[in-house]
Image: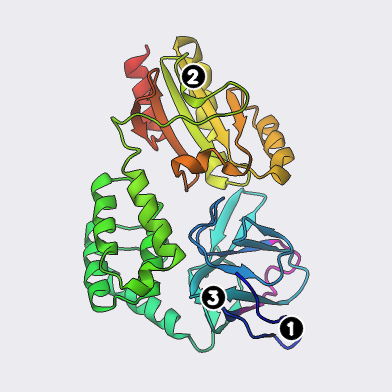
């Protein structure tokens, strides 16, 4: 995206100036509670390819994957300026390094507007916007109220996905230009495992207007679903190359069953699985089980990748797919993602949990 003029930033007054082809939004953050503590702003959907998002921070210091921005807590007030082609959802997260737990705020939308945030303890209070709400933030609250019977607003847990999707479809038919509804579907998609639910979302997407369909977010979600429906149980896993003469399918052919785990070293849910994987690997490796871990860390994060492997004593196969260039070819967009394969590369299970993997190995190896 090109800027037509030079931007002028006045962080003291909390205003972002400049004429551009994009909208200029800002997030004003007040935080006495996290003074001295590091926290993060996450915009849109976090992925190595950044294909869902069409925004950028005007100040790129301490940003990761173009969508996350880390703040050191050195000030009581921050003003973050954002260039965007259309509104994007944001949330703020805090990692408690003592317990290893992370808390996120509820989502809020930033487009051509200013959002004022007052941060308190995110483990207790997740509604953080103060002052007047923009049109998109009012719409998001209205949409959440429509499907509140099916979703826990505090945790985001979906009780009844079919019920929520039915509400969403009716809403989109009446509001085909709704960027907020598109983001709602996109943010939910990463927690959806059922092929039928994915097909339902793909069908619902077709009700959006051409204007919405022309956004990066729509195209990314639509493509993700299409390609995910190809990587399903019973299909052949596509081959990718992992450096030198090694390829995914050549490695898989050497053992009876292989869990292929896509991850990266800053992914908290990825790392949370390691203790379970280690126990399963140590118990089953002599019986024909292998784990093939493929990290999509950027070149600049290679040291952190190596340190993470050493810290958790990961003794299974490790490959670095720098910047996710090979992984991107098979449209892996969320992390962690795993596939349990047989020695012919057939997909037996996708995103299998450690408990289900343990049961599978007990039934098929011992």
Numbered disc 3: secondary structure: loop
Q: Earlier in the sequence, mark 2 or mark 3?
A: 3
**Are the residues at dot 2 and dot 3 in contact (C-beta closer than 8 Å)?**
no
- Where residue 214 sits, quadrant-wise, is bottom left
- Where residue 30 sits, quadrant-wise, is bottom right
Judged left or right of residue 278, residue 165 is left
Q: Earlier in the sequence, mark 2 or mark 1?
A: 1
Q: Position of residue 325 (x, y in %)?
A: 57, 42
Question: From the viewer's perspective, is residue 323 above or below residue 364?
Answer: below
Question: From the viewer's perspective, is residue 117 above or below residue 222?
Answer: below
Q: Nearer the viewer, residue 334 or 58?
A: 58
Q: Residue 144: in sight, yes or no?
A: no
User: Residue drawn at (47%, 48%), measured in percent from left and top?
Assistant: 333
- Quadrant where the N terminus is found in the figure: bottom right
Q: Closer to the camera: disc 1 or disc 3?
A: 1
How much space separates mark 2 and mark 1, taking CA atoms?
54 Å
How much space separates mark 1 and mark 3, taking CA atoms?
27 Å
Q: Main secondary structure of the magenta part?
A: loop
Residue 128's label in the rendered image is: 3
Residue stretch in magenta: 26-38
Q: Which residue is mark 1?
A: 8
Q: Which residue is mark 2?
A: 250
Question: From the viewer's perspective, is residue 139 above or below residue 68?
Answer: below
Q: Earlier in the sequence, mark 1 or mark 3?
A: 1
Q: Is residue 30 magenta?
A: yes
Q: Is residue 87 magenta?
A: no
């Amino acid at each position: 995206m090109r800027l037509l003029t030079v931007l002028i930033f006045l962080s003291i007054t909390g205003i972002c100036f400049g004429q551009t082809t994009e909208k200029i939004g800002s997030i004003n953050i007040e935080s006495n509670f996290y003074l001295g503590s590091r926290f993060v702003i996450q915009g849109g959907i976090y992925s190595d390819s950044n294909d869902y998002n069409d925004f950028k921070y005007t100040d790129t210091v301490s940003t990761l994957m173009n969508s996350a921005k880390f703040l050191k807590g050195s000030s009581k007030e921050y003003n973050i300026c954002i260039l965007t082609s259309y509104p994007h959802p944001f949330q703020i997260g805090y990692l408690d390094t003592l317990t290893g737990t992370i808390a996120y705020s509820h989502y809020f939308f930033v487009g051509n507007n200013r959002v004022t945030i007052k941060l308190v303890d995110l483990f207790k209070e997740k509604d953080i916007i103060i002052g007047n709400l923009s049109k998109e933030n009012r719409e998001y609250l209205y949409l959440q109220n429509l499907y509140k019977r099916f979703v826990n607003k505090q945790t985001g847990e979906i009780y009844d996905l079919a019920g929520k999707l039915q509400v969403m479809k009716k809403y989109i038919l009446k509001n085909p230009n709704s960027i907020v509804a598109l983001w709602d579907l996109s943010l939910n998609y990463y927690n959806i495992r059922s092929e039928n639910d994915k097909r339902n979302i793909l069908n619902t997407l077709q009700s959006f207007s051409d204007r919405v369909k022309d956004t990066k977010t729509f195209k990314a979600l639509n493509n993700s679903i299409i390609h995910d429906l190809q990587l399903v149980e019973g299909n052949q896993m596509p081959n990718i190359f992992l450096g030198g003469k090694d390829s995914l399918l050549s490695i898989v052919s050497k053992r009876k069953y292989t869990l292929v785990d896509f991850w990266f070293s800053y992914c908290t849910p990825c790392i949370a699985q390691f203790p379970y994987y280690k126990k399963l690997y140590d118990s089953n490796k002599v019986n024909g089980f292998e784990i093939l871990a493929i990290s999509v860390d950027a070149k600049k994060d290679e040291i952190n990748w190596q340190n993470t492997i050493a810290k958790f004593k990961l003794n299974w196969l490790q490959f670095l797919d720098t910047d996710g260039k090979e992984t991107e070819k098979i449209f892996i967009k969320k992390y962690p993602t795993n596939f349990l394969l047989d020695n012919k590369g057939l997909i037996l299970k996708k995103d299998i949990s450690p408990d289900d993997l343990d049961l599978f190995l007990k039934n098929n190896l011992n």
